[in-house]
Image (cartoon, grey):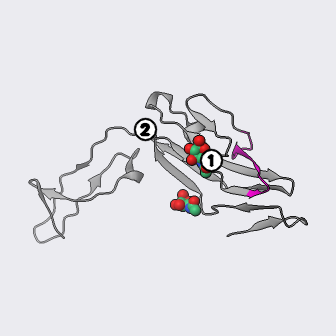
Amino acid sequence: SLSAVFSEDLHSSLYFVNASLQEVVFASTTGTLVPCPAAGIPPVTLRWYLATGEEIYDVPGIRHVHPNGTLQIFPCPPSSFSTLIHDNTYYCTAENPSGKIRSQDVHIKAVLREPYTVRVEDQKTMRGNVAVFKCIIPSSVEAYITVISWEKDTVSLVS
Ligand SMILES: *[C@@H]1O[C@H](CO)[C@@H](O)[C@H](O)[C@H]1NC(C)=O
Ligand SMILES: *[C@@H]1O[C@H](CO)[C@@H](O)[C@H](O)[C@H]1NC(C)=O
C-alpha cells in the first residue's frame, strides 16, 4: 500500500517509503542499518520507537539513530546480545508541518552466529518398505538453515 498524506499546502506531504518492510533479520556479527520507512517534504523529523511506544535512546557501540533517520544496530558479540535491542519490534515516525505518520511495525532480529551441528538418526524399516530420514537441526538455528544436500559415504545423493 502506497499512501500519502497531503496537507492543504500541496508543497508538503508525508509518505511511506517502503510499506513492505516488516522484518529485518541479520547476523549479530555484521549488524544492520534500517532506514526509516517513512519520509516527507519539507524535510521531516524521524524518530524510532519500540512497539510499546517507548522512544529509543542511543546505546554507545550498540544502537544508534543517525540524523538521517537510519537506525543502526552495531555488530555484537553473543555476550552483549540483548533481546530488548536485538530482537524487538520497532516503528518509526516522520513529522513535519503537514503532520505526522507512523510506519508499520518492523521486527528487527539479530541471529547469533554460533557453531551448530546437524545429525541424522538411525532408522529401521521392513525390507520393501520406505525409510524416512530427517535432518535434525538444533531449534535455535532451525529457522535459518537450509538443507542443501544429503551424502552417503561422502558422495552426494541425487534425487
Ligand atoms: C523494502 O524492504 C524490503 C524488505 O526488507 C527490501 O527487500 C526492499 O529492497 C526495500 N525496498 C526499498 C525500495 O528500499
Ligand atoms: C544515513 O546515514 C548513515 C550514516 O552516515 C549511512 O550509513 C546511511 O547510508 C544513511 N542512510 C540513508 C538512507 O541516507
Does the beta carbon at disc 2 come under 8 Å from ligand 2? no
> How far is the residue under mark 2 from the one under mark 1?
20 Å
What residue sits 60% from the left and 63% below the top? 20
Quarter of the rendering containing residue 102: bottom right
Q: Is residue 127 left or right of residue 147?
A: left
Q: Which residue is mark 1?
A: 89
Quarter of the rendering containing residue 49: top right
Q: Which residue is mark 2?
A: 29
Q: In the rendered view of the protein, which quadrant contains the C terminus?
A: bottom left
Q: Position of residue 157 (x, y in %)?
A: 15, 63
Q: Which mark is residue 21?
A: none
Q: Is residue 111 left or right of residue 102?
A: left
Quick one: SS at disc 1?
A: strand
Q: Position of residue 28 (x, y in %)?
A: 46, 39
Q: Nearer the viewer, mark 2 or mark 1?
A: 2
Mark 1 is surrounded, within 10 Å at the Cα level, by few (under 14), some (14 to 19) or many (20 or more) other residues, namely many
Q: Which residues are magenta?
A: 40-55
What residue sits 16% from the left and 70% below the top? 129
Quick one: SS at disc 2?
A: loop
Q: Amino acid at mark 2?
A: Thr
Of residues 23 and 38, the one nearer the viewer is 38
* Visible residue check, residue 5: yes
Of residues 38 and 97, the one nearer the viewer is 97
Q: Is residue 49 magenta?
A: yes
Q: Is residue 101 left or right of residue 85?
A: right
Q: Is residue 53 magenta?
A: yes
